[in-house]
Image (cartoon, helix red, strand yellow):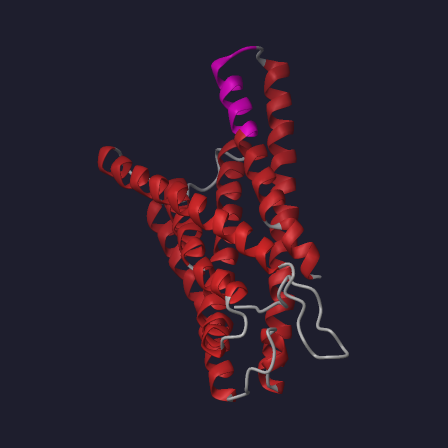
Amino acid sequence: MIYSKNETSASDQNCGNVDTSANPFFMLVYSMVFLVGLLLNGFIMKFYCCRARQQASSSLMVYLKNLTAADFLLCLSLPLRIAHYAISSSAMVQLLHCTVGASAFFLNMYASIIFMAYIAANRYRKIVHPSGTVRTVRTARIISVITWVILLAPTITFISFFISSKEPLTSNYCVDSFSSSVSLLYKILHTFSAIIVLLVFISMVFFYYSISRKVLQSQQRQLASSGSEKLVKSRRNMLVLVSIFCVCFVPYHLVRL
């Protein structure tokens, strides 16, 4: 969806060559993420499929399945990114990376971010506002479908603009090959993606703070009760979710600012 400059060093202004000394490092990192992520998400998807046969689904389970699918697809997009660093001089690899590879990478990354926000909001509503409107499985599925459609629309538009511009790939950086229209669309999408990450981060911190307050109030009213223990577990799960978000997504987007 959005194409940032490669994490490698900036172009040498004198000779116009790109410093590829960091490429082996990124190849190693992405290869490890690909292998570990593929195995873990494949196992989780199998677990969810088996569990779905044994018990009724829930809105939380719908979001978890979509999050797992997004992470799994994100892992599948990494081989093109790895090939980009391994064979940076190949025009075909560059074209595939700047269209299919990068688009799939960012599409599924932001899908993961959004579905993590849905999961956090689901936990927040259940714990802090248990008497509120109950979100059905059907509603969760509709929200999930709408989310994928909204993410796919700009992704397909961007790929179409990029291919139709017929600009030659003159650099290892995708952004250096953007036409004026593609560059404008890139800036718009880049801005919106930054806003999404910021809003999700603020929301998740707020959800964790609210749940922590609820746990504290519950513990003051009824010490060591089963309900209090469940709230403590929910707070711990929310902390894990916030921590994963901060570790996996916040540093990446801070570097891209």
Q: Position of residue 18 (x, y in %)?
A: 66, 72
Counting labels gives 0
Above-or-below relation of 200 to 175: above
Work out which residue is located at the far left of the displayed protein and give it: 53
Q: Position of residue 107 (x, y in %)?
A: 48, 62
Describe residue 5's horizontal placement relative to residue 34 as left or right. right
Quarter holding residue 88:
bottom right
Describe residue 59's horizontal placement relative to residue 205 as left or right. left
Instruction: Please indicate, yes or no, whether residue 134 appears anywhere in the rendered image.
Output: yes
Q: Residue at x 59, y 74 (%)?
A: 172
Task: Please name whichever residue, 202 or 26, is drawn nearer the observer in this view of the structure.
Answer: 26
Q: Determine if the magenta segment contains residue 234.
A: yes
Q: Residue at x 48, y 56 (%)?
A: 111
Q: Position of residue 141 (x, y in %)?
A: 36, 52
Name the quarter where the C terminus is drawn. bottom right
Q: Determine if the magenta segment contains residue 60.
A: no
Describe residue 20's horizontal placement relative to residue 166 as left or right. right
Q: Residue at x 46, y 72 (%)?
A: 93
Task: Please name whichever residue, 135 or 50, is drawn nearer the observer in this view of the structure.
Answer: 50
Q: Position of residue 96 (x, y in %)?
A: 45, 73
Work out which residue is located at the far right of the displayed protein and give it: 14
Task: Please name whichever residue, 246 or 175, is drawn nearer the observer in this view of the structure.
Answer: 175
Q: Residue at x 52, y 57 (%)?
A: 110
Instruction: Please indicate, yes or no, whether residue 115 appears anywhere in the rendered image.
Output: no
Above-or-below relation of 95 to 41: below
Q: Which residues are magenta?
A: 224-236
Is the stretch drawn in magenta largely helix, strand or loop?
Answer: helix
